[in-house]
Image (cartoon, coloured by chain):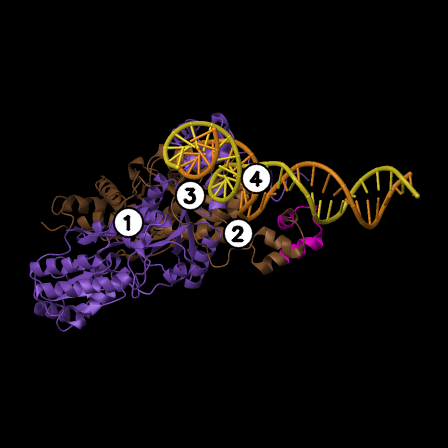
Chain colours: A purple, B brown, C yellow, D orange
Amino acid sequence: MANAYPDNPPPKGLRRPRVTIADVAEALGLTKGTVSRALNDYPDISESTRRRVARQAERMGYRPLSHAQAIRTGRTRSLGLVLQTNVHDAQRPFLAEFLAGVTQAAGIHDWSLTVASAQSQAEMLATLERLAREHKADGFILPRTMTDDCRIRLLRELNVPFVLFGRTGDATGCAWFDILGEAAMRDAVLRLAAFGHRRIAFVNGGAGFNYAVLREQGYLEGLERAGLAHDPALMRADAVTPPDGRSATAALLALPEPPTAIVFAVDMAALGAYPAAAALGLSIGRELSVIGYDGVPEGAYATPPLTTFDVDSRRAGERLAHLLIARIRGADPKTLRELEKARLLARASDGPPAVTSEDLARIVRARRGHDNTNGRKP
Amino acid sequence: MANAYPDNPPPKGLRRPRVTIADVAEALGLTKGTVSRALNDYPDISESTRRRVARQAERMGYRPLSHAQAIRTGRTRSLGLVLQTNVHDAQRPFLAEFLAGVTQAAGIHDWSLTVASAQSQAEMLATLERLAREHKADGFILPRTMTDDCRIRLLRELNVPFVLFGRTGDATGCAWFDILGEAAMRDAVLRLAAFGHRRIAFVNGGAGFNYAVLREQGYLEGLERAGLAHDPALMRADAVTPPDGRSATAALLALPEPPTAIVFAVDMAALGAYPAAAALGLSIGRELSVIGYDGVPEGAYATPPLTTFDVDSRRAGERLAHLLIARIRGADPKTLRELEKARLLARASDGPPAVTSEDLARIVRARRGHDNTNGRKP
DNA sequence: GTTTCTCCCGAAACCGGTTTCGGCAAGGAT
DNA sequence: ATCCTTGCCGAAACCGGTTTCGGGAGAAAC
């Protein structure tokens, strides 16, 4: 019989077997329990032994096995992240940087990151619950928060710690890190107004996401501060890909009084303004100004390069890891809320309007119908 | 004193406490040990008991705690992935899909994924060793393999299971999944030759990566099969971003006998051919044909859309997870090697040459120096 | 009717930590 | 001198599993 089950010969292991807490204890003539309490800063351990133990553990290279601890404490020292994989749009370009930030920050506290994925909302909830129940993660980072987010409701009910990347409708018990998208949208409008634009449109991102609500508020605040009238016809929503942005741009330009500038809530949508303008023979940055948000790398390669607000995804990941660890350790969520501003990347897709809205309307009328191919070969 | 240390009140836990193996044993009038052996298919358990145990466990919703098992078995049922975060180039667009594939495939076997990151090669090796030593992962997926890869040497020496996304120089003990990039490059050349191109250039990707060696071989094989001469002047290397591709394209077009078509080993570099051609007033797909490789989403939005070979990153992730799990369970690595072909996405960036190499040389000579702005505003 | 296997399962040790409990010794108060 | 704290640590239970060991019952062999 032996131990040949269930699979195969057991892992041979790495050269030397590992130093356990018992090794440290023996080396010092103490017991496991004492060493454990010393390392975990129990108050009934004298300062001198605490130091002795710490130094010896250091010297022997002792590192506790997180899953051995977990069996008693219930804590694995690992953060959880469940990716939604049925939405193909955004998040993609940021993920690598974001993960780099999270894992790096977690690593310096000796924590790790467990990643899972879900293809539907139901699977998302089931996965979160499973990971929590099996202690694969002590808490979760929830990216792309919705205004009304079922993940938050679940984790609240399960009493599992979490932090948001973004804000949400009901903030009770929530910790978060977020970028002030509303401030960026406001500043974008003010910048365009300072250039002399009077008709400034807004193309929002994914409906339901909390950021969309905030960015629209920022746009409206910008209009108000600039003393510009708000025209509902100049607002579009739910554009997160270049095709989305392209059709939104085309629709806006077809208006009787078209905008001379468009603020996009999402870079990937802003990139759709380029082919839309090209199809009408308009030059971005002159006849039509465009400002995006996100700082995707493609924006720098566009012609002309896209003016946008850069979001530092890596830093977001870092901060969220720190916040979540603090949250798991018991900190009050109300003290764990951080907001930062996006950084303006002033490039070449915006500038003073070369033509007025009236001129633009005439140009568009004249050119529509002539060439509505999109550059594809016949 | 109580249990208020080290951090805070312990996690309250989820509603009902969890069903343990002892609960299952008690419900059946058996002992923990027997239940454990039954669930793990030990041969000294009768078939009838095995079934009784399995059904009862199912009914009570029993799921073993992987870290409780790990304390004895040394296995956590988790796969490891360490991201290299100092290289800013490729891998980014694929990561989300790739992770989706890995986590989904791991999930159906009840495995999970642990992600970490490293900012240098030294940190990479240290992280791999730490994760292995702390049993945070039972094995690793190594993406972006180099021809001579120090990660492989380390894990070999540590006797830790791993699978490669890509192939490598020394295959001993290696399992892998890879896409036949060499076949794609060969087919690209043959496709262009069939269009009538005689001067076909090749712009390779990152030096040192094993894929670069293979793709160059594929290019050369394509030339040979097409009966075209090999001109070393038509080969460039180490281009992985649009700027890289742009300068490579510019250099190739400045040749006395410029190519009428370019095969790129990497899509992101191929996208750099667009501004390079535009700067010379050349139209992609007519005066200059371009074929890429990777299937990045940006290629579809380019004008004209980029002909390329699509790599299914999600599937790669799935297969790698399966292979690694099998490898950890003890399968022979030689039986765990899979190769698949990339899928041609025939779009509009290539076609019959509108001009000959001689004409092209004249055009380029005439237009150089006139307009070497890159579209930026003054 | 023993003896000898086999087939199954119980009992208990074990993995590497954490936590509870109790007791010894030193110091202070009475 | 006695009593009561207080500080500090050892002993042992415990967490949720896995694995080893040994033995009882029944069947087969003698």
- Dividing the picture into quarters, in which one does residue A288 lie? bottom left
Label 1: which residue? A316
CA distance for labels 1 and 4: 42 Å
Camera-side residue of A59 and B17: B17
> What residue is rendered at 18% in x and 45% in y?
B364
Give coordinates of residue A163: x percent, y percent.
33, 54
The reply to the same-chain question for discs 2 and 1 is no
| Residues flagged by tags 3 and 1 on a common chain | no
Nearer mark to the viewer, of 3 and 1? 3
Counting the numbered discs, the total is 4
Q: Name the residue that disc number 4 marks.
A: B332
Mark 1 and mark 3 in contact (Cβ < 8 Å)? no
Q: Which residues are magenta?
A: B35-55
Location of the N terminus of chain B by quadrant is top left
Q: Position of residue A80 (x, y in %)?
A: 40, 50
For mark 4, give the secondary structure. loop
